[in-house]
Image (tube, rainbow, N blue to C red):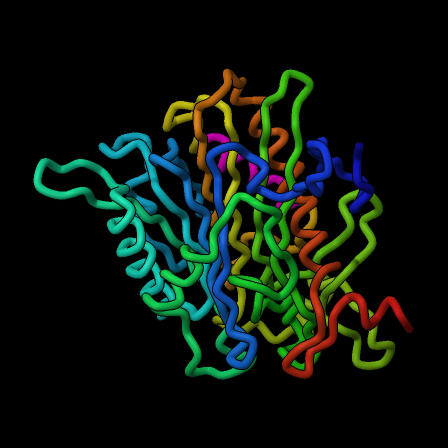
Amino acid sequence: MACRICGTCCMLASEGARPLNRTITAVPGIRAGHFTDTRGLTGCTVILAAGGAVAGVDVRGSAPGTRETDLLRPINLVEKAHAVLLTGGSAFGLAAADGVMAYLEGQGEGFATGVARVPIVAAAVLFDLAIGDTAARPGPMEGRGACTAANSGPLAQGNVGAGTGCTVGKALGMGRAMRGGLASSVCESARGLKVGAVVAVNCFGEVVCPETGRILAGPRDPVSGRPVSTTMLLGGAAECPAAGNTTLAVVATDAALTKEEANKVAQMAHDGLARVIRPCHTMYDGDTVFTLATGRVRGDVNLVGALAADMVAAAVASAVRCAAAGGDIPAWQDLERR
């Protein structure tokens, strides 16, 4: 079966009466969970890899807020990460990783140092302080809460977890923006290799359909109220905020990859962002993609990277379609009903 979300395949066959899982948790060995603050309009999402997974990362936005990304570079010692945290709250939200570490330590997970096991928790933040309660930021309790909620079932999507306070298209200011969100997608190759992605979409630019190029969400024209091109506004009426953006993604696969290959997959997965976010990787975004490879099956890095880009693009489009109005900012659903 193939679902027609912007023309991209994101399928997995069901087993008996169990519901289809078209999210990243369909990758064996991966669990995921959210903490959602519906009043403060912020939250965090954790991706857990049992026993650790070979990890990589690629940071392309120029306003990132990250943790342990240097550790994931091929030249450095540690090969596996036990979790990746995507969180709102700007740099304040990095504190939520402490709760993830505490949870994993309690589970006996971590890199063996000889005196203690140290959980490796990579993290990246997005800026959602301009919507909801500015003082609401995920911390250690919220990070732990996402872990305790994590499971291998279908991951909730929309304005949940790290997608709770996401917005899209801020070239005319927050008052003319639209809602972003969080979504996930997964596919399976002919030989049974699985690649999934989860993306929290909080970009400066607009989001377009990867199949048609139609703008799904972006800065809303003051006259028509419809989303318009961000690029056309740059250098003119655009308001370029120094903060307020960033799209974050995690790619997971059951392929056996080296650390170098995991980093290459993260690099290739950014192509998925660039297909559907215009402009992408700006000075106002901290766009970051992580890769987790659980190593259950043989897989070609080129195939994994190509599928990862497809799944990231599909998840970005889905995140906009799943989003709901909030903080006086409309969503794609609202404009489609008009």
The reply to whether residue 140 is in sight is yes
84 displayed left or right of 161? left
152 displayed left or right of 156? left
| Residue 71, placed above or below residue 183 | above
Q: Could you tell me which quadrant the C terminus lies in?
A: bottom right
Residue 269, horizontal then vertical, whole percent:
56, 38
Q: Which residue is at the front of the view, 253 or 249?
A: 253
Which residue is located at x 25 percent, y 41 percent? Answer: 110
Residue 119, horizontal then vertical, whole percent:
26, 45
| Residue 179, placed above or below residue 209 | below
Q: Could you tell me which quadrant the N terminus lies in?
A: top right
Q: How many marks?
A: 0
The magenta stretch spans residue 255: no
Which residue is located at x 69 percent, y 60 percent? Answer: 206
Q: Which residue is at the front of the view, 2 or 214?
A: 2
The reply to whether residue 63 is in sight is no
Residue 233, horizontal then vertical, whole percent:
71, 68
| Residue 107, placed above or below residue 74 | below
Q: Residue furthest left?
A: 115
Which residue is located at x 65 percent, y 71 percent? Answer: 171
Q: Residue furthest right?
A: 338
Q: What span is in magenta?
A: 264-274
Which residue is located at x 76 percent, y 45 percent? Answer: 210
- Dominant secondary structure (helix, strand or loop) of the stretch shown in magenta: helix
Residue 213, horizontal then vertical, whole percent:
81, 49
19 displayed left or right of 24? right
Where on the picture, by quarter, is residue 311?
top right
Where on the picture, by quarter, is residue 331?
bottom right
Q: Which residue is at the front of the view, 271 or 182?
A: 182
